[in-house]
Image (cartoon, rainbow, N blue to C red):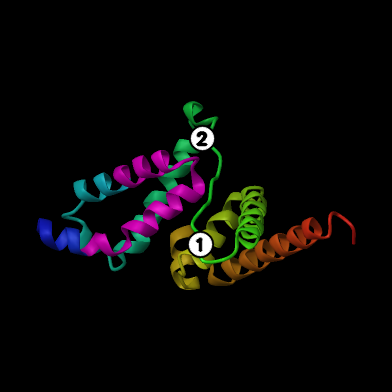
Amino acid sequence: MNQIEFLNSIMPFKDKVFRLAKRLLVSTEEAEDATQEVFLKLWKNKLKMADYKNIEAFSMTITKNYCFDRLKSKQAKHLKMVHSNYEEKSLPLQKQLELKDSIRWVAKIIEDLPEQQKIIIQLRDVEGYDFDAIAKVLSMKNTAVRVALSRARKTIREKLINTHNYGVK
């Protein structure tokens, strides 16, 4: 695989790699570093890339593993999830503040999910991956991905409803 073929094969999903890294790591800078490391690993193995049927899924697996390694390292003790992909500017200020508050709550709830559910939510609901691709990235069965996604969404929904009801049921 030459350089141009390699770049053409990875560029369409570079933003997805970045967003997954940002979901799992603390900041834009950490996510940029992770993205750079992932693409460096891909570059070093570009001759083997022709053997992979789904380079995107392979890249997401590398991203997930790299981020987990970073989170496990001692220097990563300060890392936390920050999510700010959604921003609507054409709404009145009060509505914008309410939306930002809701997004912060959802991000906090997602942050408290188990790692596997957190990744599944990111890949399915943010990145739009299908269940087969997620199952491949996480080395899980398709049905296990569906169950984990359902549980994660249920947890998010229940905690968000509880938050909006001020803890009163």
Residue bearing mark 1: 89
Residue in the foreground of this view, choosing between 100 and 150: 100
Tag 2–tag 1 contact (CB < 8 Å)? no
Residue in the foreground of this view, choosing between 4 and 144: 4
> Which label sits on residue 133?
none
Left or right of residue 4, residue 160 in this image: right
| Viewer-side label of 2, 1 | 1
Residue drawn 53% across and 56% down? Answer: 119
Magenta stretch: give its range.
Answer: 9-37
Q: Is residue 21 magenta?
A: yes
Residue drawn 27% across and 49% down? Answer: 39
Left or right of residue 122, residue 17 in this image: left
Q: In which quarter of the image is residue 94?
A: bottom right
Q: Give above or below for 104 relative to 80.
A: below
Left or right of residue 167, residue 156 in this image: left
Q: In which quarter of the image is residue 67?
A: top left
> Which label sits on residue 72?
2
Residue in the foreground of this view, choosing between 88 and 15: 88
Residue projecting furthest to the left: 2
Callout 2 amino acid = Lys
Picture coordinates of residue 83 (x, y %)? Answer: 53, 51
Residue projecting furthest to the top: 74
Residue drawn 66% across and 58% down? Answer: 98
